[in-house]
Image (cartoon, rainbow, N blue to C red):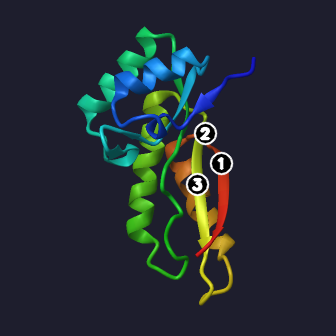
Amino acid sequence: MLKLAAFADEISPQLDEQIAVCRENGVTHFELRGVYGKNVLDFDRALREEIKSKLSAHGMGVISIGSPIGKVKIDEPWEPHFERFKIAVDAAEFFGSPILGLGFRISAEVARLNVDVVWAAIAILAIVRQTRIVSVFRMENS
C-alpha cells in the first residue's frame, strides 16, 4: 500500500496544524524532522509521547526520521556526530519508522567522501542495536 508522507514542519512548527493540513491533503505519514521549532534529535520523552499519541489518534504515523545526520564536513570528527546518530536510531525505533534519512555533504576542500568510514559506523550501530535501518542518502555539495 502506498503511503503519502510529508516533511510536516514545512507546514508549521505547531504539531496540531501539521496534523490538520496533512489530513486535509491525504497525507498519512510524517517524515518527522521538527515540531515546535525543535529538531527530531532534540525531542525529550514527553514530546515524543505527545507526537506519537496525537498521530495515532488521527490514524497517522511516522514513515521516516528526517535527521540532520551526515550534515557535517566529512573531515570533521565523527564521534560527536555518531552520538547524534544513536539518538536518530532511538527515535526511529520509538516511532516505528523503517527509514532513517541520512545526508552527506561533499566538501570542495576535501573533494572526496569517505564512504568506508560512514558505512562502518552505520553497520556497527545496526548490529549492536539489532536495528534494521533503511537509509535514504542525500548527496550535497558544500
SS of the residue under disc 2: strand
Name the one closer to the observer, 64 or 108: 108
Q: In which quarter of the image is residue 119?
A: bottom right
Q: Are marks 3 and 2 in contact (CB under 8 Å)?
A: no
Alpha carbon distance from label 1 to label 3: 6 Å
Q: How crowded is mark 3: few (under 14 residues within 10 Å), some or many (20 or more)?
A: many
Q: Is residue 78 left or right of residue 117?
A: left
Q: Which residue bears the numbered disc 1? A: 135
Query: As drawn, is 49 to the left or to the right of 125?
Result: left
What residue type is disc 2 on? Ile
Q: What element carries label 3?
A: strand
N-terminal of the pair, mark 2 or mark 1, is 2
Q: Where is residue 48 in the image (x, y as percent from the top left)?
A: 33, 31
> Outermost residue toward the right?
1
- Tell whether label 3 touches label 1 (CB within 8 Å): yes
Q: Is residue 3 above or below residue 100?
A: above
- 3D distance between C-alphas at marks 2 and 1: 6 Å
Percent position of residue 57, x then y: 41, 9
**Which label number is shown at residue 102?**
3
Q: What residue is shown with label 2?
A: 99
Q: For residue 34, what is the image quadrant?
A: top left
Residue at x-position 44% and y-position 14%: 56
C-beta proximity under 8 Å, tags 2 and 1: yes
Question: Which amino acid, by three-letter code, is at mark 3?
Answer: Leu
Q: How far apart are marks 3 and 2 (CA)?
A: 9 Å
